[in-house]
Amino acid sequence: MNTFQLNGRLVDAASVSPDVPLLWVIREYFKLTGTKFGCGRGLCGACTVHINGQATRSCLVPLEAVRNQAVTTIEGLAGKYAQPLQTAWVAEQVPQCGYCQSGQIMQAAALLAQTPRPSEEQITTAMEGNLCRCGTYLRIRRAIRRAAAGE
Amino acid sequence: MAEVASLGFCSRLSRRAFLLQTGAASCGVLFAFHGESGAARATVLGQASVGVPLSFNSWVTLHPTGRIEVVVPGIELGQGSHSTLAMFVAEELDADWSHVTVVAAPADEARFGNPMFWGLQITAGSRTCLGYFDVLRLAGAQARYVLLTAAARLWNCPISELQTAESFVLHQPSARRAPYSELIRAAHVPEKFPDFVAPADRPQLPDDFFGDPAPSPIAPRPGLKNAIRLKSPNQYRLLCRDKPRIDIPPKVNGNAVYGIDIRIPEMAHAMIETGSVPSDIPDTIDDAAVRRIPGVLEVVRLPYGVAVVGSDFFAARAGRQKLRVTWRPGTKAHTYNSAQTLDEFSRIAGDPTGNPGIRVFQHGDPVRGRALLSRQEYGVAGTEVVSFEARSELVYHAPLEPQNAILLFNKNAQSAEAWVGTQWPKMEQEAVARVLGIKAADVKINSALVGGSFGRRQEPGAIIDAAHIVRVIPRPIKVTWTREDDLKRNPFRQALVCRIDAAVDASGVIKAIRHRVVADSWFARLFPDFFAQYKQSDPGNWVGALNSYDIPIQTIEAITVRKTVDVCYMRGIGVAQVKFSQESLIDQISSRHGQDPLQYRLRMLRKVPRATRVLKAVSQMADWSRRRDGRALGLACIPYSNSYSALIAEVSLDRGTGQIHVHHVWSCIDAGLALQPDIISAQLEGGIIQGLSIALMERATLKDGVVQESNFHEYPVLRMSHAPKIDIQVLSTDNAPTGIGEIGVIQIAPAVNNAVAILLGTHLKSLPMLPEQVLRVLKDQQRL
């Protein structure tokens, strides 16, 4: 049994080998493709999800490690900062190709949940693991500030 | 239990996932959903009324609901092309912007080719918006004309009394109005449209790379007295002001469907093992353990690799891990070494007599130029020769979405259908056709949303693997590359050496200049006809050597050295590397003559007002003359794709580690008529950050043909902590729209080097500007 909570629902990826990374279970078994494959080694952050509220690289977490845990993907992102972040991301016109942005938003949401008014340094530290090849970092930073300020 | 749980779950959570899963996904459905929230946007129109859609031309269709569907020929790379291209139509059609949806054009160069890109249907070269500006405005104007004609007929009034606004036709004298959708039934699309003209348009200028622009169908010209007039820019409601991009909302909630996310019914998955040199040929294949894995369908030998095919992704992935293959060399790529290659290029660059190369450009008297540039002349003519040579390493495009493709082969019909993210659909068609032995026209390409490209997707990748597999497995095949595959198999940005010699008089004025550019060529490998058109040279390598500086004698020599490792244009083509040398040289000369680099450029560019304007503006933005403790400002001025841009970087140097820090960047661009100012700004911001990443840390290092870097821990890409503050000023001028997609990448590296030269006392001579280079300079200085 590979049961865990995915976006608030109890699910079971029974037929999947327990050592398969959570990323591929989310994408290929549950067909939630908002979580992206970028590097497979925890280097780019495109696959960031929340496990019990903590921003985590799903490409590094084997399925068995999330048994009975709560996994949240971009599709299920809710809570106090979800809507403000997504609104801020649109207001600042952040994404270019957009491929990394699910991961960026998941990372930012975890940051704000823990640190509602982050300093510039705290934003940098939190977001350092999330690559953006299009170079949208400045707008990501602005969007996080905007969401934190409740604009 | 699992199946039920996952299916039900998905259908509730995501309508898109459900549709794709249940096989309702004809490509039309796919595009409706990834088609930039097309479906969502259209719902504002309410219930469908009866009737059939009306197509005005190849580009615009009006639906009975009022939805206006625009075919967009350029792919959405994140540069906002879908929004901006559709806006060209909407502007002239006076459409309600919220009624406009887009659909990606099929591969059809005759209908959808870019007139400013030799008619090719390619999204590249900073040419998409400027190339389609005229044809799409014309398409919108034609649609409006049809609707006006219909209303005039219905209301029995002259067209001249009618107006349009927000998808309505209005007749003020009778206070009548009709939404566009109500006019469909009365509308008649003529066999031949009347002439249209855009009287306020400034013509597109010739381009260094592309030459003279194609004639515009709406250019003012004689004999157009009765032509219908398009808007002048001061009448625009959508263009030239910032509108939110339509591709963004689905990119913030996980709903955007990229190529890697697409599923089609019956699809099997494949992963591809290749040798450490990706052109190696599989010798022995031990797949016994692979075949024992449940779900593994087949192991397929490819000419250059081995495919493990599984009924699902998990099987393919697990199978690949168990595969054991030995390899033998398939090409001479094993002989390639990065360091030796650049040494070779440098020897050639410094030997104009032994290896003159192709003279691709000459301005002024070449004999006089040779005399001035020969060192014997030193002192005699009152000139000295100043030289600058820089080398640039191979660079990995590194789009965050690895290469992938889905291919379906219908053997009986000898046709194929593909889902793939591509900048140039025709290349994908031809690649598939070659492998399958069918006609390119019988390969249907569904152009998928791409997670970054930067030039990489100008040529096929994973689709070739898929083509080999579908020959033997009668199922649609999805190939997904890992990051390691993607890096190893990437055709890199060309390694390049640019040497410049300049004869400079006592007052610092350049009397003659010669650029020698040495590199391998993308054109030579894939497009011998294009290569021949440029006198057997690759313009991507050398057009950056053209410049705006007032220099009476200029020579450009291009030397193409074919190597055994594939190269492919990257954003900024070879201009980024050449400008690194050129703009560094300009500062080297101005500093030798004790002149301020800004003043020096203003003098040398006094005949180019667009350049001096952005130089003056950026110097004000950065407060150029103010000294900064421990920091220096570096300047670069770049003309590219008829844009003029100047950039200043504020830089410091850690003398202990050798690390260059860029703190603040200011840039001002004259983008001609700035069609979407915020998108231009975003392109510059992103380009500057990408360019800085390439300038400071990126290189693919090959030893005996093997790429030494495997993933982002070894191939670093700039992260947030190293992203400087950036201030952009976009000047909208009355010139035709210019190209803006690449110029950010181009301008940052030389500006940083010019600042480093102030801090270090000398310029750096290679890209990337790694700490070890800085430390080597410091060490040499201590020794002296």
Image (spheres, rainbow, N blue to C red):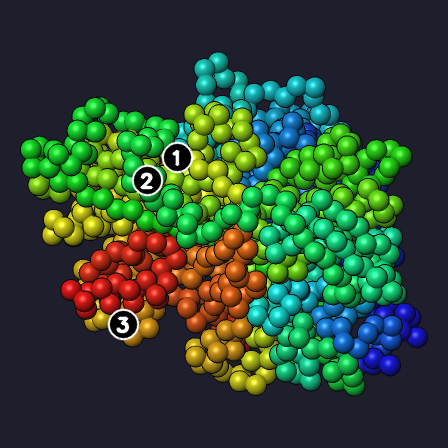
Question: In 3D space, how far apart are the residues under numbered discs 1 and 2 (Cα atoms)?
Answer: 8 Å
Q: Nearer the viewer, mark 3 or mark 1?
A: 1
Residue B684: mark = none
Residue contact at pointers 1 and 2, CB within 8 angstroms? yes
Residue B349: mark = 2
Which residue lies under the disc numbered 1? B559
Mark 2 element type:
helix
- Image coordinates for residue B428, horizontal then vertical, percent: 67, 39
Above or below, B475 against A108 in this view is: above
Question: In 3D space, how far apart are the residues under numbered discs 3 and 1 (Cα atoms)?
Answer: 37 Å
Chain ID of residue with mark 3? B
Chain ID of residue with mark 1? B
Q: Amino acid at mark 2?
A: Ala
Q: Is residue B258 left or right of residue B22?
A: left
Q: Where is the N terminus of chain B found, in terms of image quarters?
A: bottom right
Q: Nearer the viewer, mark 2 or mark 3?
A: 2
Which residue lies under the disc numbered 3? B655
Is residue A17 at least partly visible in the picture? yes
Disc nearer the start of the sequence (2/3): 2
Q: Where is the C terminus of chain B found, in terms of image quarters?
A: bottom left
Residue located 72% across and 63% down the image: A33
- Image coordinates for residue B101, horizontal then vertical, percent: 68, 46
Residue located 59% across and 55% down the image: B488
Q: Amino acid at mark 1?
A: Ile
Estimate how packed mark 1 is, as few (under 14), some (14 to 19) or many (20 or more) residues with alpha carbons within 10 Å: many
Q: Nearer the viewer, residue B169 or B614?
A: B614
